[in-house]
Image (cartoon, rainbow, N blue to C red):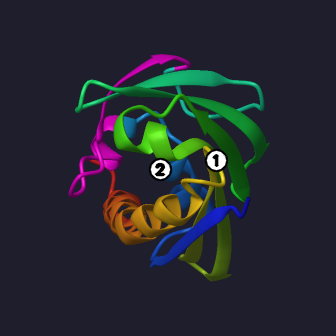
């Protein structure tokens, strides 16, 4: 079976460290909100702080009543992190058995950072792979773009 890959990027007018801190931080519910039919995060349990070390696990409660489990796989401070998502529910649960999220932060100039977010989905079976690919490619990029816009806004905003 082929993986379904979605990649989105944004340029953030701040340091890689600041962009990284926002994207890997604990403010999950304000950044990863409902977008179209993709549910948003309304609660976090387990590891409720910023990501900091491989092996950390958190459970995200979604506004559609579902939940997913995230486990941090890799972490390089201010550079990158990766996590595995399992336990999809609803439509995604029928089409996708797990996914891996990967984030990279590259400071391209002083206070300018390229943020790249990759999602790699594993279909539940070869039978649903074509449908999985169509649905994920149609819906997930918009969700990623909206979250990246919120991350950009938060990272570029002066501290209050």
Is residue 137 shown above or below 160?
Answer: below
Q: Secondary structure at mark 2?
A: helix
What's the residue at 64%, 47% (across, down)?
Answer: 125
Q: What is the span of residues highlighted in magenta in the rendered image?
A: 29-47
Identify the residue under disc 2: 22
What residue occupies the far top of the structure in this picture?
Answer: 46
Q: Is residue 105 magenta?
A: no
Can you give x and y, in whole percent of width and height, for residue 105 in the image?
65, 66
Q: Is residue 108 or residue 35 the one in the foreground?
A: 35
Q: Secondary structure at mark 1?
A: loop
Using residue 70 as the reference point, say whether residue 34 is left or right of it.
left
Q: Is residue 79 or residue 64 the one in the foreground?
A: 64
Cα gap from disc 2 to disc 1, whole angstroms? 35 Å
What's the residue at 50%, 40% (across, down)?
Answer: 25
Based on the displayed image, in which of its 4 quarters is residue 152 positioned?
A: bottom left
Q: Nearer the viewer, mark 2 or mark 1?
A: 1
Is residue 111 shown above or below 131?
Answer: below
């Amino acid at each position: 079976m082929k993986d379904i890959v979605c990649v989105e990027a944004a340029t953030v007018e701040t340091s890689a460290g600041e962009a990284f801190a926002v994207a890997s931080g604990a403010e999950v519910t304000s950044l990863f909100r409902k977008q179209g039919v993709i549910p948003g995060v309304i609660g976090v349990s387990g590891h409720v702080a910023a990501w900091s070390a491989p092996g950390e696990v958190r459970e995200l409660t979604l506004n559609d009543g579902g939940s997913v489990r995230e486990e941090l796989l890799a972490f390089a401070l201010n550079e990158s992190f990766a996590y595995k998502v399992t336990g999809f529910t609803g439509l995604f649960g029928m089409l996708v058995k797990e996914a891996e999220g990967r984030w990279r932060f590259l400071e391209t100039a002083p206070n300018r950072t390229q943020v790249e977010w990759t999602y790699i989905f594993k279909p539940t079976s070869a039978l649903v792979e074509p449908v999985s690919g169509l649905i994920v490619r149609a819906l997930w990029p918009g969700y990623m773009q909206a979250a990246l816009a919120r991350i950009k806004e938060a990272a570029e905003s002066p501290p209050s």
